[in-house]
């Protein structure tokens, strides 16, 4: 492992805490060391209080903060003496430890301190680093792992058996191992857990971590257990969206709420899922208990979610009985699925959860394969895994807020999403917690929203091949489809009927009508599997109830789409799918309405532009946001008993009324 220390970079980080921030970020840059909020770092220092007294402080990483992007404010300042006194107690509950650590803070607005704060306080060195290095865990989780780790560690590294993180780990370390630390001690390896290094400077502690992990990597290399060889199997050519959507529906039933599913079919994922011994090596348990909260104890093999849920509940009940502990069980839905056709599937409550789960299990696969190359993979006993999975401090992190987002765990697809009403619909759906697939012929669609819960795809809605590919990509990314917003459309220049050429007519019909038939046809089977039933919102037009001269092609296409939606509402009600339409008018914040066009139309009516924008009964300006909010509401619980409805969004129009 290569040190990332850079003298020029380091100079930009002033003071002891600044150096702590810098090397913490260096650790965070290495996924083989820490992932998504994992790992802990700290620095000790002094501060003078209001009374002139000198306080020795421990600045320890706040719980849940990510080392990759950590800032100084993410370190919790604790009175070191107060923290060390906790280690004098014979026992300390998690709740009491959390309360006492909060009391020890010098800043009441600081983040909650890491559960390893007592351990960090006990180590005398100024800087302390703690990671979950893959190479070390792979060796630790192999046959004779303890002996192997001691061999690679040498005399300058302390090796400590696994102990539950928090107070128990700190207590055991202080009583049994702290006295053995000398000036020559490089660090501590916590079996099945991670690596701790320390030093008088941030650089010394960091580079000791690099040195120790490099030893582990060289150990694996010398035994042909470092390089992972996987066949470059191409992903299956057949579409898998219905299989994924069915699996997602089963997961949602087990979880009791909608969930997202993401398919990974890269060479490593496929090769691992297709191994002859996958049923053995994948069912031993997590690489480290720190991962179990996100990935659960073992992955689901195949697609039988119901059988997995039953087995998982039995596992929880057995350990509850054995430990005589009552716990509030998390849902029995899997978080990782291994399937020879689909690859590795990550399951989560939102898009960020998907990414974290996938990253953690990808590293787990690598650890398992390296340990297997050493003779076999051996995880911790189920009891130790159970203790972490149902640990009060970890469960508290996963508590969902009482006002969870309305569309959490659900997936929407919006056409014509790069601008105007379509883009506003994406914003409204994202704001409600949905994961959104946006389609448009404008390349800007791919970068409209740079966030994990959005997938922008370039797609010509009149090309059935592109549409099918978009559905496949969307389902592989988020697992299914719950909501469909059909917005894409074109409005040609005004032409009287006698001047309307066939090419223009066919083009308008192709985009505004035919393409939507294809979308409805492709979406039906997916919507029928939606955990909370499928929903469709059609963006129609005022021209449906009140056509205008010169708009024959547009008016006819929108009227035909309206009839198509009504028929689909009749036919799909038995599948629990509801379809509703909304008819906007005079929405001026779209690409269609340029400043020149607005000026021209306002002059035609003898009005100012502002007056023209409010030329409706309510004298209000209708925006894309108003239309989008109604479309999102139509997909929400307010309309759960409504289908086949048509609502105007036009500020009131005499012809429509």
Image (spheres, grey):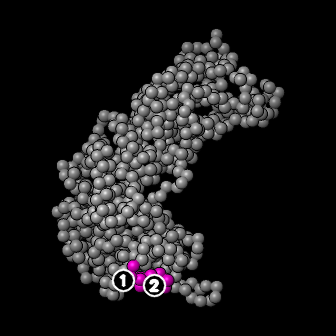
In the drawing, what numbered circle is on residue 78? Answer: none
Res 540 → quadrant: top right
Q: Which residue sits furthest right?
A: 606
Q: CA distance from mark 2 to mark 1?
A: 12 Å
The span picked out in magenta is: 81-91
Q: Which numbered disc, 2 or 1, marks the residue closer to the eye?
A: 2
Q: Is residue 516 visible?
A: yes
Residue corresponding to mark 1: 174
Please report the residue visible at 39 percent of the width from the left and 79 percent of the height from the top. 91
Would you call the spot at circle 2 few (<14 residues within 10 Å), some (14-19), or many (20 or more)?
few
**Are circles 2 and 1 on residues that touch, CB within 8 Å?**
no
Q: Nearer the viewer, residue 232 or 75?
A: 75
Q: Is residue 291 visible?
A: no
In this orientation, which residue lies closer to the viewer: 78 or 364? 78
Q: Left or right: where does residue 265 sit relative to residue 565?
A: left
Q: Is residue 536 magenta?
A: no
Residue at 32 percent across and 83 percent down: it is 177
Quadrant including the N terminus: bottom left
* Residue sitting at x 57%, y 88%: 54
Secondary structure state at the residue bearing disc 2: helix
Q: Position of residue 225 (x, y in %)?
A: 21, 62
State the residue position of label 2.
85
Q: Earlier in the sequence, mark 2 or mark 1?
A: 2
Within 10 angstroms of label 1, few (less than 14), some, or many (20 or more) residues? some
| Residue lying at 27% horizontally and 63% vertically, measured from the top left | 382
Which quarter of the picture shows residue 584?
A: top right
Task: Report x, y in % for residue 307.
Answer: 28, 46
């Amino acid at each position: 492992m290569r040190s990332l220390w850079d003298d020029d970079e380091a100079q930009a980080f002033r003071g002891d805490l600044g150096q702590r921030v810098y090397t913490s970020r260096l650790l965070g840059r290495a996924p083989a060391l820490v992932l998504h909020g994992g790992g802990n770092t700290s620095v000790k220092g002094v501060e003078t209080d209001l009374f002139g007294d000198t306080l020795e402080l421990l600045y320890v990483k706040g719980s849940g903060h990510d080392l990759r992007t950590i800032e100084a404010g993410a370190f919790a300042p604790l009175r070191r003496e107060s923290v060390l006194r906790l280690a004098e107690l014979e026992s300390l509950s998690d709740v009491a430890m959390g309360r006492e650590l909060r009391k020890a803070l010098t800043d009441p607005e600081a983040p909650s301190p890491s559960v390893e704060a007592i351990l960090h306080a006990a180590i005398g060195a100024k800087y302390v680093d703690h990671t979950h290095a893959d190479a070390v865990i792979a060796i630790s989780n192999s046959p004779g792992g303890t002996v192997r780790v001691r061999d690679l560690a040498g005399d300058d590294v302390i090796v400590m058996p696994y102990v539950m993180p928090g107070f128990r780990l700190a207590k055991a370390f202080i009583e049994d191992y702290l006295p053995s630390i000398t000036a020559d001690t490089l660090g501590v390896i916590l079996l099945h857990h991670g690596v701790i290094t320390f030093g008088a400077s941030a650089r010394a502690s960091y580079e000791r971590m690099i040195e120790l992990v490099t030893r582990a990597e060289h150990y694996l290399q010398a035994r042909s257990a470092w390089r992972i060889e996987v066949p470059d199997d191409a992903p299956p050519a057949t579409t898998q969206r219905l299989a994924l959507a069915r699996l997602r529906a089963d997961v949602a039933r087990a979880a009791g709420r909608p969930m997202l599913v993401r398919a990974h079919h890269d060479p490593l994922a496929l090769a691992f899922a297709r191994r002859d011994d996958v049923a053995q090596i994948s069912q031993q348990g997590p690489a480290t208990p720190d991962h179990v909260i996100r990935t659960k104890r073992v992955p689901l093999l195949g697609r039988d979610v119901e059988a997995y849920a039953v087995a998982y509940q039995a596992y929880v009940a057995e350990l509850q009985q054995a430990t005589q502990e009552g716990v509030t069980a998390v849902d029995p839905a899997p978080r990782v699925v291994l399937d020879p056709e689909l690859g590795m599937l990550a399951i989560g409550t939102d898009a960020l959860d998907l990414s974290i789960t996938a990253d953690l299990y990808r590293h787990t696969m690598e650890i398992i394969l390296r340990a297997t190359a050493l003779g076999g993979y051996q995880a911790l006993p189920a009891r130790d895994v159970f203790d972490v999975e149902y640990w009060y401090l970890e469960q508290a992190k996963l508590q969902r807020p009482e006002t969870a987002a309305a569309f959490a765990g659900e997936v929407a697809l919006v056409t014509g999403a790069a601008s105007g009403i379509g883009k506003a619909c994406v914003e409204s759906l994202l704001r409600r917690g949905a994961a959104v697939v946006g389609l448009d012929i404008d390349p800007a669609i791919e970068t409209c929203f740079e966030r994990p819960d959005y997938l922008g795809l370039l797609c010509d809605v009149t090309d059935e091949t592109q549409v099918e590919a978009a559905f496949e990509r969307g389902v592989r990314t988020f697992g299914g489809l719950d909501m469909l917003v059909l917005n894409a459309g074109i409005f040609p220049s005004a032409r009287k009927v006698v001047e309307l050429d066939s090419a223009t007519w066919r083009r308008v019909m192709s985009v505004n009508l035919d393409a939507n038939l294809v979308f409805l046809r492709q979406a039906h089977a997916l919507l029928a599997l939606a955990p909370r039933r499928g929903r469709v919102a059609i963006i129609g037009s005022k021209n449906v109830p009140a056509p205008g001269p010169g708009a024959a092609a547009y008016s006819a296409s929108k009227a035909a789409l309206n009839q198509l939606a009504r028929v689909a509402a009749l036919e799909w009600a038995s599948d629990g799918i509801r379809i509703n339409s909304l008819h906007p008018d005079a929405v001026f914040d779209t690409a269609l309405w340029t400043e020149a066009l607005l000026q021209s139309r306002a002059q035609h009516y003898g009005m100012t532009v502002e007056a023209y924008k409010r030329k409706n009964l309510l004298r209000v300006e209708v925006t894309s946001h108003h239309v989008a909010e109604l479309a999102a509401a139509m997909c929400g619980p307010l309309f759960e008993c409504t289908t086949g409805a048509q609502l105007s969004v036009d500020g009131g129009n005499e012809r429509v009324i």
